[in-house]
Amino acid sequence: MKFVENVRPDVTTDIVYMMCPMHLLKLEEQIKELEQGQILEIMTDYDGALEDIPAWCDKTGNEFLGMEDSGDFFKFYIKKLTR
C-alpha cells in the first residue's frame, strides 16, 4: 500500500459509516464530476477499500496516488486521468 501525506484534493467525499459497495459507487460518481488532472479524496472506514480502490484505479485508468490511515478511517487519493 502506498502511503502519502499532504495531498491537496480538489474534492473530498466522506463516506465513513456507509456500507459496501458505497465506496466504489461514490468514487465512480465523484470522479465523473472532476476535470482531468484533478484529485479526489475519499474518506471511508471500510477495510475492503484497501484493495478495492487501487484495483478500481487500475481497471479504469485513473491514478491511485496513495492513502492515509487516521486510525478511525482511511483517506484515499485518486487523480482523474481518463475523460
Image: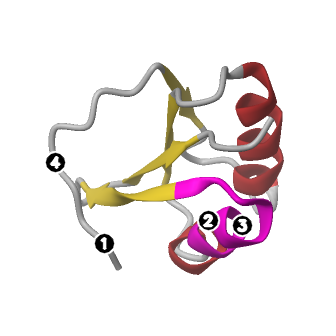
Marks 4 & 3, CB-CB < 8 Å contact: no
Residues rendered magenta in the picture: 54-63
**Colouring:** secondary structure
Quarter of the image with the N terminus is bottom left
Residue topped by disc 2: 53
Residue topped by disc 3: 56
The amino acid marked with disc number 4 is: Glu
Q: CA distance from mark 4 to mark 3?
A: 21 Å
Label placed on residue 2: 1
The amino acid marked with disc number 1 is: Lys
Residue 33 higher or lower than 51, as above or below: above
The amino acid marked with disc number 2 is: Ile
The amino acid marked with disc number 3 is: Trp
Is 47 or 32 nearer to us in this picture?
Answer: 32
Badge 3 element:
helix
Classed neighbour count for the residue bearing mark 3: other residues with Cα under 10 Å, few (<14), some (14–19), many (≥20): some
Marks 2 & 3, CB-CB < 8 Å contact: yes
Percent from the top left, x then y, of residue 16? 54, 44
Q: CA distance from mark 1 to mark 3?
A: 15 Å
- First in sequence: mark 1 vs mark 2: 1
- Residue 68, quarter of picture: bottom left
Label placed on residue 5: 4
Residue depicted at x 58% and y 80%: 51
Q: CA distance from mark 2 to mark 3?
A: 5 Å
Can residue 60 be found in the magenta stretch? yes
Q: CA distance from mark 1 to mark 2?
A: 12 Å
